[in-house]
Image (cartoon, helix red, strand yellow):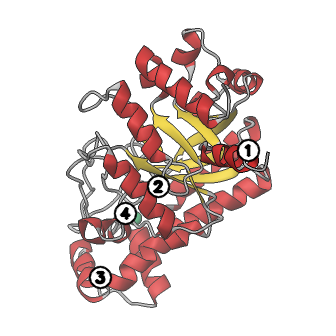
Amino acid sequence: MRYILPIILATALSAQQVEIRGTYADPKAFWAAGARLDDYAINAIFVHSGSITPALIERAKAEGAAVYAEFATLNGKGYVEQHPEAWPIDERGERAPAATWFLGACPTEPGFKAHRLRQLEQLLDSREVAGVWMDYFHWHAQFEEPEPILPETCFSDTCLRAFAAAAGLTIPAGSTAEKAKWILSRHERAWRDWRVDVLGAWAREFRDVMRRKKPGALLGVYHCPWTDEEYDGARRRTLGLDLEALAGVVDVFSPMVYHGRMGRPPEWVGEYVEWISSRLSAPVKIWPIVQAHGEPTPISAGEFERVMRLGTSGRASGIMMFTFGSVAGDPAKLASLKRLYRDWAGMR
Ligand SMILES: [Zn+2]
């Protein structure tokens, strides 16, 4: 008898527990196939805020899953065309061109910020979501490609004024290009720090709105999966993402470890999750999003299962995949998902 207990304990401890067994994207293809979330042990679905309806929330709840809103935050496409004052301005003083498919927005333009905060309030007033995940939360740039695009922005009038005030500097008169050159050559460090602070202020305002409207709901961020050193420190330097600064504000980091999109091997998913696990301490949680979508090259069911397992490395306590539709459309991936999630939920 005394030998049995340690064996039972060892078995229980060796079974991996994953608290959040998530999916990303509208579950309509999954539901259309006649599947149920609880049968797959899915307990969290992340859906674009505009696609969340009361009926979707009700059905997810009936099948044991909470709904989290993906909230497009600093993307400008669809807004800056109508409100050119919010177009990000590059170091030449010109409107920054779209970086492949992404176009950012000026994060200090007051009309744009008011617009996004209003959208957040409307979402929280009208939908019972368990959390909001800030997406496209970075200064204008493109990191979801094998060769990232890392422009210098934003030198709009509102940014120049806000930076000068925050840094206690008087920017010499001249063209925008001359001002940008002066800042980058003489006050680069203050500029990079200020850009981090601007995103921190956005995150704090989001958190404050959520505490007021939906106490207990989580604030998450879909995050660039680069270490501190990669691309000459571009995660902080260009995107404005400082891990410590954000960890003090958000509840959950969801690094976007899209190995296929970024031209990296599946093993990198595990390496990165281990890295960020050691870099960020509790209570901030880590729920990575891995790639299931077959673009630019196909992702096999075996590869999908591999990155799902690697995505739960380190101290990750949740996971989701991009996209749920890609899994729902592939019987082999669906079978992998069901096996993994039921196992991680302790279901047999
Ligand atoms: Zn600006």
* Secondary structure type for disc 3: helix
Closer mark to the observer between disc 4 and disc 3: 4
Q: Residues within 10 Å of mark 2 (few under 14, many from 20)?
A: many
Specify which label sits upstream in the sequence, 4 or 3.
3
* Residue position for label 1: 4
| Residue 230 to residue 62: above or below | below
Specify which label sits upstream in the sequence, 4 or 1.
1
* Secondary structure type for disc 4: loop
Q: Which mark is residue 239?
A: 4
The N terminus appears in which quarter of the rendering?
top right
| Residue 170 to residue 63: above or below | below
CA gap between label 4 and label 1 equals 54 Å
| Tag 3 near tag 2, CB within 8 Å | no
| Residue 152 to residue 46: above or below | below
Q: Which mark is residue 137?
A: 2
* Residue position for label 3: 183
Closer mark to the observer between disc 3 and disc 1: 1
Q: Nearer the viewer, residue 139 or 299?
A: 299
Q: Is residue 65 left or right of residue 296?
A: right
CA gap between label 2 and label 1 equals 51 Å
The C terminus appears in which quarter of the rendering?
top right
Specify which label sits upstream in the sequence, 2 or 4.
2
